[in-house]
Image (spheres, helix red, strand yellow):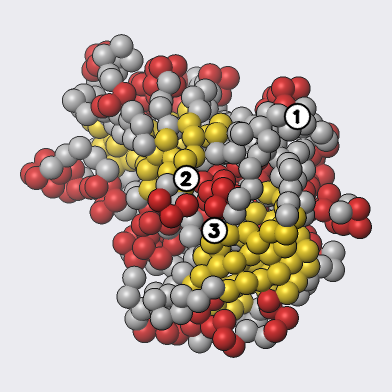
Amino acid sequence: MTPGAGETKRAAALPPGVSRGEDAADWPPDLRRCDVVVIGSGAGGMTAAAELAEAGFDVVVVEEGGYRETGDFTAEPSQMVSSLYRDGGATMALGNPPILYQEGRTVGGSTVINGGMSWRTPERVLEDWHRRSGVDRIRMRDMEPYFDRVERRIHVSHQDEESIGRDSELLRLGAERKGWDVIPNLRGQLHCPGSNNCAFGCPTGAKQSALVSYLPRALHFGARVISGLRVTRILRDGKRAVGIEGKVAGPRRARRAQKLEIRADLVILAAGATQSPALLTRSGFRAPSRQLGRNLSLHPNAKVVAVYDEDVRGWEGVHQAYQVREFEDEGLLFAAINLPPGVLAMSVPRYGAELGELLQDYARTLVAGVLVEDTSVGRLLTGPGGWPLATYQLGDRDAHQIVRGVRLLCDLLLESGARRILPPFEGVGEIRDRADLDALDPRRIPKSAMEVVTVHLMGTARMGKDRSEAVCDSFGWVYDSDRLMICDASLFPSPIGVNPAETVQALATRNAQHAIETWTER
């Protein structure tokens, strides 16, 4: 993105404690040496940084993306996607079908662009992690103090009724008419007014992303943040992590491509389930289990677009005010979302006059999605230059569940008054009545015809008691290394079936506490 007047204004208004990588020549000397360096500023990284800084440690957080504050976020998707998303939101896991995924690349990480949903890890998942993977102190009774601490910090609550949009109300109405279980969503927000701009940065600051919750706390306790610095490798002394090496990642990186080093006594890696394994590999760390980069889960999502006779005005309200949980035991969740016109136009298989007709009905459209708790697993490969390449083959069971979920969701939307629905399958016509639902047959829709996306990547450096099967121990310490910890969703031994942000934050709180308790032992 070409810097404009707004960019210049932002560059001059960095808050105390936040620096830019391209200004390394002006860094104070103490910025190149600290107790803890944290790689990544999202749900895991900024949470761990705040906890350690509050405990009195000298913490530096390094973020590849730039710093944006609340006043910089607008409803212009192209501008926000280019400045807040990695690779403009166009990253893809290769397979059949290819699956688009999105990651945040900004101070605050993916919490800046997620919907703010905040759910505790289901108890059945925590029990499974303990039983199957041997993760210590992970059961609900162990995790409750960490969930409580996170929820207080980000103000987890239900949406104020007056800010719930018609799209969410129609979803709830259809579920209730079907007799299905539908619940108000829990979100990390403080009296959200309902601008439904969650995926492009909250313009009011109501959504409690790491940018407005954990970042100010970390800075208050003395942590420093460096934006626009891409970490190229973790520095090592034998098996011990001793710091990081990076390069400027901003628009002027060609002029300032010198290597920059920050030395630290502890390195915390919180770059996400794609970037963390790649960075470990580039840095020469090898898991004894040979599982680094494997076990990729991603909660496949499929969306439908429904058109009503009434105005829906999806831009009014909030992202996912309700979730339909009737089929949670099958690993299926339904929710209403909102896509701006340009994004909607790019994501439906409609062209020319047909697309124009759909966009004329934009005010009457409702976009809803189905999330599948997957049983398939993919892999993170290290591509040219040491950067990650995700591969994922959708399994037969999960493909069946996607079609089944879409059929159930279409049935719900018909019940709430939709007059036509566009399913996410190439070659399948519109759904106008229940007779058309027969076209949504898993035996007749190939994987190659499916449009699948995700924002939840997990599991590529999974934790566990057995070093022959896991990459990290129960508290995120990387096996066969020293002073190196992971605090992101790559730790998950399995998918969790709900939005993962609070799980990441609770694990980061727990892992940071473990680092504090064992500091003198390492």
Q: Earlier in the sequence, mark 2 or mark 1?
A: 2
Q: Earlier in the sequence, mark 3 or mark 2?
A: 3
Q: Nearer the viewer, residue 503 or 185?
A: 503
In the rendered image, which residue does mark 2 sit on? 382
Q: Is residue 14 visible?
A: no
Q: Residue at horizontal 78%, vertical 47%?
A: 510
Q: Residue at horizontal 54%, vertical 58%?
A: 109
Q: Position of residue 506 (x, y in %)?
A: 72, 46
Mark carried by residue 109? 3
Which quarter of the figure has residue 500? top right
Residue farthest toward the front in the current orientation of the protein: 238
Foreground: disc 3 or disc 2: 2
In the rendered image, which residue does mark 1 sit on? 466
The amino acid on which the numbered mark 2 sits, given as a three-letter code, is: Thr
Q: Residue at horizontal 31%, vertical 53%?
A: 340
Q: Earlier in the sequence, mark 1 or mark 3?
A: 3
Q: Residues within 10 Å of mark 1 (few under 14, many from 20)?
A: some
Q: Is residue 391 left or right of residue 446?
A: right
- Secondary structure beneath dot 1 equals loop
Q: Is residue 305 visible?
A: yes
Location of the N terminus (image quadrant): bottom left
Residue farthest toward the left in the current orientation of the protein: 353
Vertical order, 17 against 421 (above or below): below
The amino acid on which the numbered mark 1 sits, given as a three-letter code, is: Asp
Q: CA distance from mark 3 to mark 2?
A: 22 Å
Q: Residues within 10 Å of mark 2 (few under 14, many from 20)?
A: some
Q: Position of residue 280 (x, y in %)?
A: 60, 50
- Secondary structure beneath dot 3 equals helix
Q: Residue at horizontal 56%, vertical 31%?
A: 295
Q: Nearer the viewer, residue 22 or 383?
A: 383
